[in-house]
Image (spheres, rainbow, N blue to C red):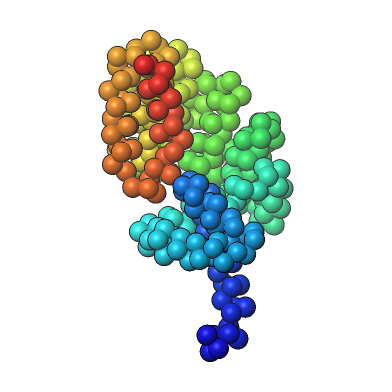
Amino acid sequence: MDIIQPYLPLIFTVLRVLAVVGLVHAIVTKQQLFWMFLLGFGALLGSIFGMLGALAYTFMVLIPALRGSGRAAGQAVSRGVEALKPLDTRIREAGERLNESDTLAHRADLAALLARAGRNDEAQATLDPLLSGIYADDPVVLLTSAELDLTRGNPAGAEGRLNAVDLRTSAATRTRALTLLAQAQAAQGKSQADVTYTDAMTAATTEEPRARYAAYLVKEGRAAEAQPVLDAIAKTESRATDLYRRQEREWFDLASGLRRELK
């Protein structure tokens, strides 16, 4: 004990840092409340019990998650930490980044945040310079602008932009573009929304197309057709990794709500 006595302050500092990191990770990944309380004691109060819990969480949850999901897990934590900031703060910081470097990514990020805050006119104004420049045909620009059109009640405008997206860019682009296109068509009462949703579900990179298609079918009064789609989503959720369940939580929750509605 005498040997480690000089190192105790450093050990406690390291454990408290682990508690803070673990608490953020637990919140982002929606871990059990037990872990959150345990890590909270370690992070906020510096209790021995809490810090030992931080050590246990690091080896039992955090390290396996990072090892199993690699870069994606790190990005999920990073996004979660960013999401803890107030929206106004994130908008201000995004604006500062854009002022420092006027890039497509910075403009798209700021536009998305402004849209989330309901500031759609500002979001569109942020994107407008890209729509008439060299990035006019870029999928990121077209998809972001189409989402804004849908939010502003302009599905015809969104459909026009989405028809210009090159679906060969990537599987993720194809999935997102077709899902938005189906929404735009459905908002206009077009029958081809059904086929477009089906196309979006083919080789989809997210559960969003299936969840939105099920919601569309329920809204159209086609509950019998929606049920197999919802069952398939439930089956996927039961077999999915923890990381995938966290990534797709919004769509799994939407499907769960629809299943309750149909009971």
User: From the viewer's perspective, is residue 201 above or below residue 43?
Assistant: above
118 horizontally vs 147: left or right: right
- Please give the name of the residue rendered at 44% of the width and 55% of the height, measured from the top-left corner: 73
Q: Is residue 240 visible?
A: yes
**Closer to us: 79 or 143:** 79
Q: Residue at x 69, y 57 (%)?
A: 100
> Percent from the top left, x then y, of residue 44?
64, 59
Percent of width and height locating residue 42: 58, 61
For the C terminus, the image quarter is top left
Viewer-proximal residue, 66 or 72?
66
Q: Nearer the viewer, residue 191 or 29?
A: 29
Left or right of 243, for residue 26:
right
Q: Residue at coordinates 29% horizontally, 17% vertically from top-left?
A: 225
Residue that lies at the very extreme toward the front in this rendered image:
1
Q: Could you tell me residue 18's position as x and y percent? A: 54, 65
Query: Does residue 48 lie above or below 178 as drawn?
Result: below
